[in-house]
Amino acid sequence: MNIKVEDRMSSKILSIESDRSVLDLARQMTEQRVGSLLVTRNGQYIGIATEVDLVRKVLSRELDPRETKVASIMATPLITIDAGASIMEANDLMEESNIRHIAVTRYGAIVGVLATRDLLHPVCVEA
């Protein structure tokens, strides 16, 4: 059974502008109940900001979340995988890149996000 990334990804793309504050980022992630947001500038996806970024790049450095901009903590460049790739390929790429969220593309356009928790769904094997 070859499960594709598109079978497990979230097609709801949530984002935040790079010039917004980290406090705005945290509030939006809390409201949306997600662990990451894609980061945009002038309508283009340029990176991703995650809960881990908040802890490692803001809290541990005692930065002011009201003054710190998302652009200064986001991970860039954005690592992507094609929607038709297998979840095993996605797992390997995420492990190699030491990331927990990856943007999913189709024909070069971002169509979703895959998180490590999306890979935890049981794989059903037909007998």
Image (cartoon, grey):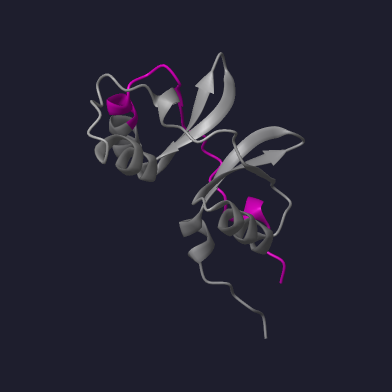
Against 63, is 98 above or below? Answer: below
In the displayed structure, does residue 80 sit left or right of residue 11?
right
Question: Residue 33's quadrant in the figure?
Answer: top left
Residue at 53% x, 61% y: name it: 119
Q: Nearer the viewer, residue 108 or 111?
A: 108
Left or right position of 84 against 64: right
* Region of the chain picked out in magenta, as a range: 1-25
Say which residue appears at 71% left-offset and 72% top-offset: 1
Residue at (52% x, 34% y) in the render: 13
Count of number-bearing discs: 0
Q: Does residue 7 sit above or below 2 in this rendering?
A: above
Residue 125 drawn in magenta: no
Please, which residue is most extreme toward the bottom here?
127
Q: Quadrant of residue 53?
A: top left
Q: Residue furthest front?
A: 61
Left or right, residue 33 beside residue 120:
left
